[in-house]
Image (tube, helix red, strand yellow):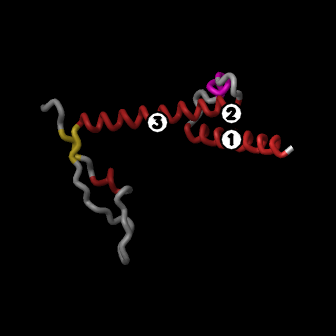
Amino acid sequence: MPDDPIIHVPQEVFRRSTLYRRPGRNLNCASAPQARLSRAEVNHGLGKFVVEYQVLEWTIKEMIGFLLRKTDWTPGFIVTADVSFRRLLDVLLALFHQRHSVERIRSST
């Protein structure tokens, strides 16, 4: 068994990204991509994706902490512990709109 075997990626992996529409054809028609990726390339790509996702999630938690209290972000990290990514985005958007509307009211008076 070689140290770095080749992984053949099945067509289903690419199906959603390669859909196209032609007159008279169904959307389920997809091109037949040929992909040969080494295990190291897959592991590197997956690892990079996971790390970047984690950085994004941490940044959103920092922004929530900042919007809750500018001087101490700890309450933001406490509140966002074990919160799903979708909920983090909802909280961030709600806090941003709340802060933006309060600042707009303060600046107009």
Residue marked by disc 2: 67
Whether 73 is among the magenta residues is: no
For marks 2 and 3, give the one nearer the viewer: 2
Q: Nearer the viewer, residue 108 or 88?
A: 108
Q: Residue at 28% x, 62% y: name it.
A: 31
Q: Earlier in the sequence, mark 1 or mark 2?
A: 2
Residue marked by disc 3: 53
Q: Earlier in the sequence, mark 1 or mark 3?
A: 3
- Measured from the top left, where is residue 41 in percent x and y? 26, 37
Query: Compared to 75, does 104 lie above or below?
Result: below
Instruction: Tell me the magenta residue range.
Output: 74-79
Q: What's the residue type where badge 3 is placed? A: Tyr
Within 10 angstroms of label 3, few (less than 14), some, or many (20 or more) residues? few
- CA gap between label 1 and label 3 equals 21 Å
Within 10 angstroms of label 2, few (less than 14), some, or many (20 or more) residues? some
Residue marked by disc 1: 96
